[in-house]
Amino acid sequence: MDPRTLLHAALARLNVTLAPVRSNRLMWLEVVVISLGAIAVGMFFQRDNPFQVGSEFHWIWLAPVLIALRYGVVPGVVSSLILIAAWKLILLLGGQQENFPEQFFLGGLILTMICGEFSAAWSSRLRRAEETNRYLDERLARITSRHLLLRLSHDRMEQEILTKPVTLRDALNGVRQLTAEQTKDRMPASGRLLQMLTQYCQLESAAIFIPGKDGCYERTSQIGSPPDLSAEDPLLQHAIENRSLAHLQLKGLGDNELPSPFLVVVPILNSEQESLGVLAIDRMPFLAVNEENLQMLSVMLGYYANCVSEAEGVRIIRDTFPSAPMDFAAELHKLLMLQRGYGINSHIVALPFGNDDAGRQAIAQITRIRRGLDISWLLPVGDRTLLINLMPLATEASVEGYLIRIETILMEYMGDGYDQWRLAPQRISFAEADPVVSLQRIIAERHD
């Protein structure tokens, strides 16, 4: 395995050990063991006063404080209660009579609760930061994949324009439409995907497989007559282990002349590196087994996997907004989930323009200044066009800056600001009770 992968796994395990998940099943066992361990250590060093009552520093309270910092207020309080119960039990077993040290235990309990609140606040911030970075990483992976797909398709456009009247973009949009409609299928539109791959990547015999029962692989669609895919296939194992395309010319596949009946095995991975299945190719033209064609194959499968992962969210949004673009619907659903789950805010800004040349020119100028993450939706509403700009992870300051840039652009290029264009920008914060209802209301008002 790649040393970087091993290092990443080791760091992940260390992170879980030092900063475990708050709902860890062993949490309560740790609470009991650490608390009783602190009492045992106190008895070992100072048997007549294991709780260090009246000493210069009460070391025993490090146990509840540590638990509170790791897991929060409630486990810390439980640890404190264990100390109180142990103190009473030791007195009872020893037959001693002492007044309850209220200040000692009250001060320790308050310190524990403060540490627990501190832990909860920072854990919440860390989760929000992790989810934000996770969203940005996923978005970057999808954008990179699409740019690569665009470059590869442009390289082929000139030589294929006469023989293939359907463009690659149209074919991909068709696949995305089918995946959004067939959300109940595990691999929706896999037959259509294979047809598209046959056309653009010159496949002759191939099949798409998904993991089945008992470690077997079940085929969902095929072209030609490919053999069954075994879980012991070395190409499959290499592809799954490295999460990348594997072909027969790779090194380290064994000394056999034909270690696999397939030429190429490609895992179908989305931008979060989740596997939906594999594509196994057993026959394709010799000249088609080149780096560019295999790269095109991987990118198209990645695009398909992202479409499948986003299909349910797209369907939910398009049930409410049927004319919303697929990309807009997918990002809107993801951002709504981020807001509801982690409180990570985003915004929508809606701007109305006239359905004339001046309005279209203004929209073109404004589209150029949007942020790299933003996604626009042009919606004709009555005699005007509504420019709906989705701004992922945008704060109030980001929205203000965006509107100021719009006004500057209109004044520089069009000769005037909001007054001439009768713009009334409307904002929707995802922190509202229901941003979808707010967007519906804005659209309905423009219709009226």
Image (cartoon, rainbow, N blue to C red):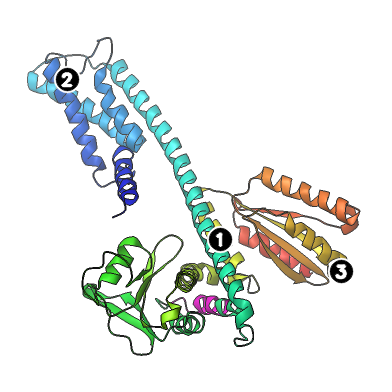
Q: Find residue 360 and report its horizontal and vertical position in percent.
A: 82, 66
User: How many marks do you count on the picture?
Assistant: 3
Q: Where on the picture, by quarter, is residue 247?
A: bottom left
Residue placed most toward the observer, 186 or 13: 13
Q: According to the image, label 3 marks what residue? A: 357
Look at 24% across and 74% down and name the residue there: 259
The earlier-in-sequence mark between 2 and 1 is 2
Kind of residue at badge 1: Ile
Residue placed most toward the observer, 352 or 237: 237
Q: According to the image, label 2 marks what residue? A: 42
- For the residues labelled 1 and 3, the Cα–Cα distance comes to 31 Å
Q: Find residue 71 and report its horizontal and vertical position in percent.
A: 33, 38
Q: Looking at the image, is mark 1 or mark 3 nearer the viewer?
A: 1
Look at 73% across and 45% down and name the residue there: 401
Kind of residue at badge 2: Gly
- For the residues labelled 2 and 1, the Cα–Cα distance comes to 58 Å
Q: Which residues are magenta?
A: 173-184
Q: Looking at the image, is mark 3 or mark 2 nearer the viewer?
A: 3
The quadrant the C terminus occupies is bottom right
- For the residues labelled 3 and 2, the Cα–Cα distance comes to 83 Å
Q: Secondary structure at mark 3?
A: helix
Q: According to the image, label 1 marks what residue? A: 143
